[in-house]
Image (cartoon, rainbow, N blue to C red):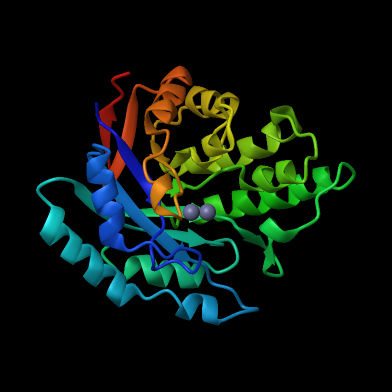
Amino acid sequence: MFLTDCHLHSEFSFDSQTPVNDIVERAIELGLSEIAITDHFDPCKADPDCEKMYDTENYFKRIYEAREKYGDKIKIAAGVEAGQAQLYPENVKKLIENHPYDFVIGSVHNVTGDIDLAFESYTISNKTSWLERYFLEAAEAAKTGLYDVFGHVNYICRYIKKKTVPLNVHDYEDLAILVLRQVIALGKGIEINISSLRDGGNTTMPPIELLKKYRAMGGEILTMGTDAHVLHHVGKYAEKGLAIAKRAGFNYIATFENRKPIFHKIEI
Ligand SMILES: [Zn+2]
Ligand SMILES: [Zn+2]
């Protein structure tokens, strides 16, 4: 069975300390055929150091060394999770056009004003306006086309749920479709982010209802990633994730090389 994890953070992310080689060795142990190491590039006016912290030169050096050492056992894609293209399109463009990435995930972690969605206070009465705010900016980010797949499409939902505010896919379905429409129109893809499977239950980001919508709208490109920031999350629930993708109507899971998708049959 072709197993993959195309959303992984290493020591080159501000919020992870896992050495690249440790990730690769763990992935080999788990029998993954391919991985993409996608560290954070999060431009931010409020804190210009965020961008400087991303050490592109040493990142690529480490990836090339890992390929040299483990290339016969696993395929290692050079990736990046580039945040906030709706706010900093020039920064993202400069980064991805000037480095030999295989794979670019486009994500929205912050909205206008460099407001980090992870730290807001969500309540029953403000959730609708937050959902609108997030998805409208996510649609703007999707419109830039500065990515291969859009990361965790319903990212804000993770934090609304953490505040135990009730949330149903119908609360934001129409807004999420605005993002999916841009993605499909530009021939890009989305990811099934399976980090939420670690919280128990069967919910992925986006949830199966939205994956089905994306497929019905003509969406074909789907990658899968655990969004692991620590070693023991690498590849976690990869088979379960593939089974959910299959149930949503996908027969193929994609990986990327030189920014082009390669499709692998889901055998499950
Ligand atoms: Zn992210
Ligand atoms: Zn991530």
Q: Does 142 sit left or right of 20 as displayed?
A: right
Residue 119 screen position, x and y as percent: 72, 60
Residue 118 visible in the shown view: yes
Residues 215 and 167: in front is 167
Residues 148 and 1: in front is 1
Residue at x-position 53% and y-position 34%: 197
Residue 258 visible in the shown view: no
Residue at x-position 63% and y-position 40%: 178
Q: Does 158 sit left or right of 48 as displayed?
A: right
Residue 53 screen position, x and y as percent: 46, 77
Q: Quadrant of the C terminus?
A: top left
Residue at x-position 44% and y-position 43%: 226
Residue 182 screen position, x and y as percent: 54, 43
Figure check: 30 above or below 78 = above
Q: Does 222 sit left or right of 15 as displayed?
A: left
Q: Specify the quadrant of the image occupied by residue 34.
A: top left
Residues 82 and 14: in front is 14
Residue 200 screen position, x and y as percent: 58, 32
Residue at x-position 36% and y-position 46%: 6
Figure check: 53 above or below 108 = below
Q: Specify the quadrant of the image occupied by residue 1.
A: top left
